[in-house]
């Protein structure tokens, strides 16, 4: 281990000794780089191993998140309260969730949808390593998710939402709940740090889309370019519009906040490829708002476009079925109708739409692995812009497919936007 890894290993050992499973155990911690630079926009990741000094005890594999060594980047991370939120979520909220679910004889829910967290504070989060310990894996962000995967992910999301709804009711309402679980309702997109970091990301996404379309003339291309040109400079404000609090919303829940491919893992049967497990990860951007904010973000960033278009209604109905059944099992029924959910979606879909356009409709995800958030000289957005333009030049066939998808994507925008016909 290098000096930084040794320091991190000492820190991990110090806090891991506080965990009930490890208290009074004699062990050492070894830390290695996870080999991932750009996959985490907020944190730097590491792999760890707990090696017990007593014979016969199997080592435990860890996944560790820390802030990056880039202090400029960390100003943004601190401003959006990313590590603070996640510490509250794993150390306080999930503890309350477990007690609540035990009282409802539904404790298996918490272990089915959340990873085991050994420790979390404002600088570090330590999890079980789901990949090494249990065989979980990420879905390729570039490939995106098929119908079965999407239904699995939406079931987990619905269960998460239903649990939060019930627990908030158990605490006699949101005011009391968020007084106890501080910052879980903090809206990070209202900060200057978020505006400063995300505005160029979204605007670069529009520019990349226009570049792709200009290289691939065809039916609907000119109209799509004109639509995108007219939206320049407005994307972040449209995102904020989707995130505005509204007491008239039929349903509000604790949103994941960043529910996309890279923040979930699947466990599949190695012989049949059947999905047998699914976990939601990374609760650094939670918010209290309509569940459709999470839904729109997920389906525009992570579901294959052809699946989303062909099965949109089916996916929303499936989510609703899981939401209603889970809430009923917890004795806090929701009973939301499809029409209510769909109209709520139309009201708030732009958040997911614009992030999806900036990252998955263009080669953002394809090049994110090449972005180094520890680089103090070249910013993340600048790195991403250069990498995307380079990728566009080198992949003409894929770019052609992206152009055809973009035309269809803007048609979806017009279909969902409740204001489109009057603007």
Image: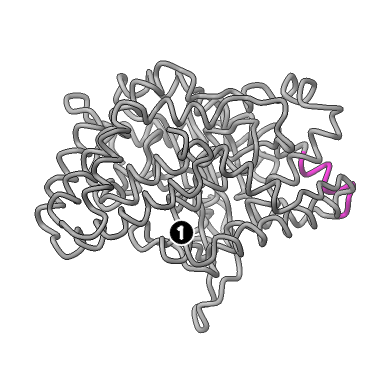
Asked if the stretch drawn in magenta spans residue 342, the answer is: no
Secondary structure mostly seen in magenta is helix
| Left or right: where 82 falls relative to 8 | right
Provide residue 138's location: percent of width, then percent of height: 44, 59
**Residue hosting label 1:** 303
Provide residue 174's location: percent of width, then percent of height: 76, 26
Task: Point out the image quarter for the N terminus.
Answer: top left
Farthest front residue in view: 422
Q: Residue at x 61, y 36 (%)?
A: 17
| Left or right: where 67 falls relative to 129 | left
Where residue 23 sits, quadrant-wise, is top right
**Residue 69 seen in render:** yes
Q: Residue at x 48, y 61 (%)?
A: 308
Q: Crowding near pointer 1: few (<14 within 10 Å), some, many (20+)? A: many
| Left or right: where 145 falls relative to 215 | right
Provide residue 405's location: percent of width, then percent of height: 31, 58
Residue stretch in magenta: 97-105
Q: Residue at x 52, y 63 (%)?
A: 266
Farthest bottom residue in view: 271
Farthest top residue in view: 192
Task: Point out the image quarter for the C terminus.
Answer: top left
């Amino acid at each position: 281990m290098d000096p930084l890894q040794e320091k991190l290993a000492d820190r991990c050992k110090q806090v891991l000794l506080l965990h009930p499973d490890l208290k009074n155990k004699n062990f050492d911690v070894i830390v290695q780089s996870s080999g991932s630079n750009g996959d985490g926009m907020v944190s730097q990741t590491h792999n760890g191993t707990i090696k017990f000094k007593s014979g016969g005890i199997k080592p435990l594999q860890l996944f560790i998140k820390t802030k990056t060594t880039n202090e400029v980047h960390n100003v943004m991370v601190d401003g959006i309260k990313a590590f603070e939120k996640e510490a509250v979520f794993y150390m306080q909220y999930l503890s309350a969730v477990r007690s609540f679910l035990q009282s409802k004889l539904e404790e298996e829910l918490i272990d089915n949808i959340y990873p085991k967290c050994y420790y979390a504070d404002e600088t570090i989060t330590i999890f079980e390593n789901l990949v090494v310990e249990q065989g979980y894996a990420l879905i390729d962000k570039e490939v995106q998710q098929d119908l079965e995967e999407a239904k699995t992910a939406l079931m987990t999301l619905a269960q998460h939402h239903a649990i939060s709804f019930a627990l908030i009711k158990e605490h006699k309402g949101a005011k009391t709940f968020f007084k106890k679980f501080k910052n879980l309702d903090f809206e990070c997109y209202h900060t200057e740090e978020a505006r400063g970091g995300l505005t160029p990301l979204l605007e670069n996404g529009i520019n990349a889309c226009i570049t792709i379309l200009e290289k691939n003339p065809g039916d609907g291309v000119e109209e799509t370019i004109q639509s995108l040109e007219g939206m320049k400079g407005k994307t972040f404000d449209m995102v904020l519009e989707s995130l505005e609090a509204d007491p008239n919303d039929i349903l509000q829940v604790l949103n994941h906040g960043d529910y996309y491919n890279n923040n979930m893992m699947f466990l599949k049967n190695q012989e049949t490829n059947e999905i047998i497990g699914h976990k939601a990860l990374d609760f650094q951007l939670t918010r209290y708002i309509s569940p459709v904010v999470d839904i729109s973000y997920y389906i525009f960033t992570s579901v294959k476009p052809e699946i989303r278009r062909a099965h949109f209604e089916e996916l929303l109905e499936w989510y609703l079925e899981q939401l209603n059944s889970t809430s009923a099992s917890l004795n806090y029924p929701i009973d939301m109708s499809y029409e209510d959910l769909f109209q709520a979606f139309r009201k708030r879909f732009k958040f997911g739409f614009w992030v999806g356009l900036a990252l998955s409709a263009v080669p953002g995800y394809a090049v994110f692995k090449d972005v180094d958030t520890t680089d103090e000289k070249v910013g993340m957005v600048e790195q991403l812009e250069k990498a995307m333009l380079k990728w566009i030049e080198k992949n003409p066939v894929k770019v052609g497919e992206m152009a055809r998808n973009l035309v269809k994507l803007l048609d979806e925008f017009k279909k969902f936007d409740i204001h489109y016909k009057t603007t």
